[in-house]
Image: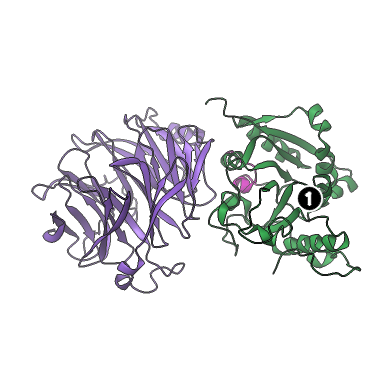
Chain colours: A green, B purple
Amino acid sequence: MSTPDSSTSETQVKLPQKRYYRQRAHANPFSDHQLEYPTMPSEMDWSKHYPTYYPTKDAECDKKVEFADIGCGYGGLLIALAPLFPEKLMIGMEIRLKVEEYVYERIKALRLQKPGSYQNVSIMRMNAMKFLPNFFEKGQLTKTFFLFPDPHFKARKHKARIISTTLLAEYAYIMKVGGILYTITDVRDLHEWMVEHLDAHPLFERIPDAECEQDPVVEHVRTATEEGKKVARNEGDKFLACYRRIEDPLE
Amino acid sequence: MKARYTDVVQHPSQELMVFSYGQGYYVVKTSTGEIIKQVQPSEENKTSGLEHFRTTTFSKDGKYLATTGDDKEIRVWDTTNWEQQSARPVLKRINAMQFTKDGSQIVEADKFGDVYVFPTEVSETTAAEKQEEMKKNKPIVGHVSMLTDMTLSDDEKYIITADRDEHVRVSRFPNGYNIESYCMGHTDVITNIQLLPWAPNILATVGGDCTFRIWDFVVGKELHSLQYKSYVEKYVPEGVDANSMDPIVMKMELNMKDNIAVLSFAKAPILLVLKWDASKSSFEFSSIVETSAPVLSFGFDIEGNIWTALDDETRVAVYLRKDGSVSRALCYC
């Protein structure tokens, strides 16, 4: 499979239909999926993802991916953010194959429908719990998103949760000081778990709710994703918590 | 048939080596080859024949020996009389373990991907208290995949961990939440990592991809990579590992006397000797030592001779090293 490409000149491009890309909501993050990943960030071929910015694999490009949506699902957030931040490269990471295919087709169609737009957004199938440092250098990302993650309710499955003390160390590593980590969920237990772990992590500091509301991204965090829409339809709660990556206070 | 040895370690300052088997071990005086102590598991601790010591390590001053195995316990032994001083339960099986320099703490990396730090002294007395203490202790570093090896930097400012997904991570110690760098480049499992004793700012790493790499680990920069497949492939039986066609390194030891690195491989009857070239700050091939059977474990004695635990009736063979040449000299059964 290749990645989004805007070289054809079709005018009537249809968006993919989600019903052909349904997949169960869970994947085991510990199993060895057939994944392709670079041995180190400098080996990554971004030209497949952002041909406008990276004409070839080794092309000089001063732009690096800055936003990552971890477990991006059907890609609603990034599609909403792409026109808002046309100068920022953003990537969605999704472990489920069919969902990744859907987002890929969606971005491809959007690029064709609006030539010149959506060149800054892409998707890859990846296990972010294992391979983030293969893609991103220290301090590269300015925004990371964890939206409606798998709650893994059972206590013995808690290690599979995307926010944990030990994984936060990896997220802190790839994030720039001052960068923002966004979390939202409709599951109160999971919200409390994420807040507890982020609060306890010395490299993250909670952004007060009032300040979050000033952030233009937050409204999309609430409403742009599939899950966000579903929760709204069911009139469920949404618990938001945003954190800033800070310097190590103990250094 | 006698049990095979599973690990070999050298005392940091005396002519003593410890050969582990099952739940017990022999202490061998290397100058004479004499077994000075045989430690057997007490009847109450003996649960099944399958429980091997997997990892053994001395404290820097040689005062303590720590052992751990399939029983998920860390046992600390007083090396003056080889009496067991303490036992502490751990959550998961341990793949690497080290004392801090002052001997006050034990750092261990487990199969679940976590690193824990424990005081060497066990103050809890009852089993229930020990269990409680174990559950309260939080990991300082965690990977999503199994940890294969771990070491502290010489200044104990960093902890370096390696996993089966090709990652070598350098975190602050003891503040493991702050990752300093990654050493990225290996394309298969990493099995052994060690600092060069003569240049402790350099880390050596090996595993399943037939490259021996050295790193400026603080910044995660690869300094040199040596491809050794052509030297070893003819000795490695086919289909050793379903996941890999290449020989997998079982153990790596570095010796300061003449700045060499020695590697042993899964199911291969050889040792690969690499030599440090100080002028180029890199390693090069030196020799292959053929052994009579696959090498289960090995270590250097204080003279720099290589004591090997072999997978045959010989069980132990010593390879004497003199002026760059190696000769098989003694066998102990």
- Give the chain letter at badge 1: A
Task: Tell me where residue B212 appears, x and y as whole percent.
Answer: 37, 56
Tell me: residue B128, above or below residue B203: above
Q: Of residues B70 and B156, which is closer to you in this image?
A: B156
Image quarter of residue B120: top left
The residue tagged 1 is: A78
Quadrant that contains the C terminus of chain B: bottom left
Compared across the picture, whether B159 is left or right of A151 comes to: left
Q: Is residue B70 visible?
A: no
Residue at point 62%, 60% (across, down): A57
Task: Tell me where residue A144 appears, x and y as whole percent.
Answer: 70, 43
Compared across the picture, whether B17 is left or right of B99 comes to: left
Task: Tell me where residue A118 appears, x and y as whole percent.
Answer: 81, 55
Quadrant that contains the N terminus of chain B: bottom left
Residue at point 50%, 42% (across, down): B181
Residue lying farthest to the top in this orientation: A250
Q: Which residues are magenta?
A: A154-165
Residue at point 29%, 58% (across, down): B284
Q: Of residues A207 and A158, which is closer to you in this image?
A: A207
Residue at point 43%, 39% (across, down): B159
Q: Is residue B141 visible?
A: yes
Q: Of residues A239 and A111, which is closer to you in this image?
A: A111
Q: Of residues A233 and A240, which is closer to you in this image?
A: A240
- Taking the magenta stretch, the answer to whether it contains residue A159 is yes
SS type, badge 1: helix
Marks counted in the figure total: 1
Tell me: residue B260, above or below residue A99: above
The amino acid on which the numbered mark 1 sits, given as a three-letter code, is Leu
